Amino acid sequence: MYSSLKYPLTGAPDAGNTAWVLASAAMVLLMTPGLAFFYGGMVRVKSVLNMMMMSLSAIGVVWVLWVLFGYSMVFGDDSAGGWIGDPTQFAGLTSLIGGSFGAGGGPVEIPLVGTVPALAFVAFQAGFAMVTVALVSGAVADRMRFMPWVIFAGLWATLVYFPVAHWVFAFDGVTAETGGWIANQLKAIDFAGGTAVEINAGAAGLALALVVGKRRGWPREAMRPHNLPAVMVGAGLLWFGWFGFNAGSSLAADGIAAVALVNTMGAGAMSMVAWLVVEKIRDGKATSFGAASGVVAGLVAITPSCTAVTPIGALGVGAAAGVACALAIGLKYRFRYDDSLDVVGVHLVGGIVGTLMIGLLASSDMPPGVDGLFYGGGVAQLGRQLVAVVVVLAYAFLVTAAIATALKLTIGIRADPQHETDGIDEHEHAESAYEFASSHGGHGSSGLFGKQSG
């Protein structure tokens, strides 16, 4: 049955590589709940559940679409010049199940991507799609209605993430029979998604924030994080998951995965230090919020470059990201766009820094075998990286703005002003994150802690 398929290949999977990809898939899935903690801690107490729900709902929405046609749009055969995969080729994933599993001592013959079961690759890549959709929500914290967000998430995944992921991740003969234009024609280097995940989500977050509008009272009122320990826990979960995100993208338990893991560690650590230095010089204090944000900025920047630069180069990428992102989060006040949780300042700017620095710091000693400008490679690779950045940024921004505007004019996307003031958790979910009042009444059940604040 499966021998007639041009792609994927069929055969017996490699046990070690399969184990690593399965573990990496679980690590990448953990990133979305980790992001829910990270984002949830950043918002005010009256909207924490809504914020976390926006992240967690991405898991359900994306998985359903991924099974039905999303995986096929990303990794199906391309017949449109590298722009989109065939949405019917793997629809429902039915062509990726079955085969011979070695029952009765016979040979194992199942669909593969590389040396791992195709379904393991399906699950691994689904995590990328989930967390990318969830990232966008941080730009509109405190003010977007939940059901319009769910509809937006489905439309955005279909019209923005799936096509861009095809451009970047569908390699001819490796992860697709015929794949995307950035990977195969432009030959820009993006190992794990600096463009498809980070720049894509950052540009979308900017467009969505502009269409939805500013929070009530912003920037006059202080809108401080309500739970910094949750922010730090979220950053830790993201860092852990990012090892699967980057090193798992090797699809093998090999030296390339080891390079990606070491560079992911280095860039996150260096970026945290750089961010804290900027904070100390600029504000006189080094904060826990800055440490968590610095870690994420470095992880964002190393995502495209984790196999292209040396460990010293990874420190350079992390330093550049920590400084650039720490400074970039102030741009929203200068240009008056309300990006609530700094999706633009961290993910868009960090993604641009990491993608472009490949053209500067890439070393031919590393797996891609390409030298950047600082290693005598000229400007050719930098030019390729720049084209990928500009096209993904422009596409994500314009299509996101169109989707958000269409929803705004039809079903409406902004929370009612009174609901926004009172707290979006109560009105959208009929719940509150914290119950301060005693369930037994008596002393302490009213007064200062009898009502939520924030």
Image: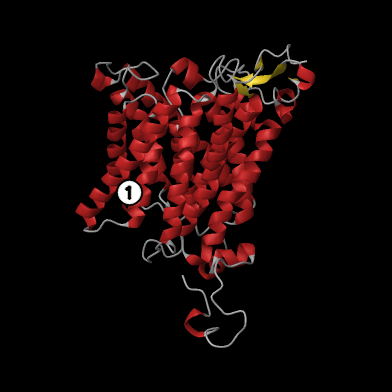
Secondary element at image label 1: helix
Left or right of 203 in this view: 383: left
Q: Residue at x 38, y 21 (%)?
A: 384
User: In the figure, residue 106 lies in which quadrant?
Assistant: top right
Left or right of 28 in this view: 387: left
Between 117 and 73, the one lying in front of the other is 117
| Residue farthest toward the bottom in the current orientation of the protein | 442
Q: In the displayed structure, would residue 301 be above or below residue 238?
A: above
Any part of residue 151 in sight:
yes
Q: Residue 152, position in %: x, y?
A: 60, 45
Q: Residue at x 68, y 20 (%)?
A: 111
How many marks do you count on the picture? 1
> Alpha-carbon neighbours of circle 1 within 10 Å: few (<14), some, or many (≥20)?
some
* Quadrant including the N terminus: top right
| Residue farthest toward the front in the current orientation of the protein | 105
Between 446 and 232, the one lying in front of the other is 232
Between 323 and 203, the one lying in front of the other is 323
Q: How is the image coloured?
A: secondary structure
Q: In the displayed structure, would residue 323 be above or below residue 106?
A: below
User: In the figure, residue 64 lies in which quadrant?
Assistant: top right
Q: Residue 395, position in %: x, y?
A: 49, 32
Circle 1: residue type: Leu
Left or right of 176 in this view: 332: left
Q: Residue 101, position in %: x, y?
A: 74, 22
The residue that disc 1 covers is 331
Q: Residue 387, position in %: x, y?
A: 40, 24
| Residue farthest toward the right in the current orientation of the protein | 104
Any part of residue 42 in sight:
no
Q: In the displayed structure, would residue 231 be above or below residue 395?
A: below
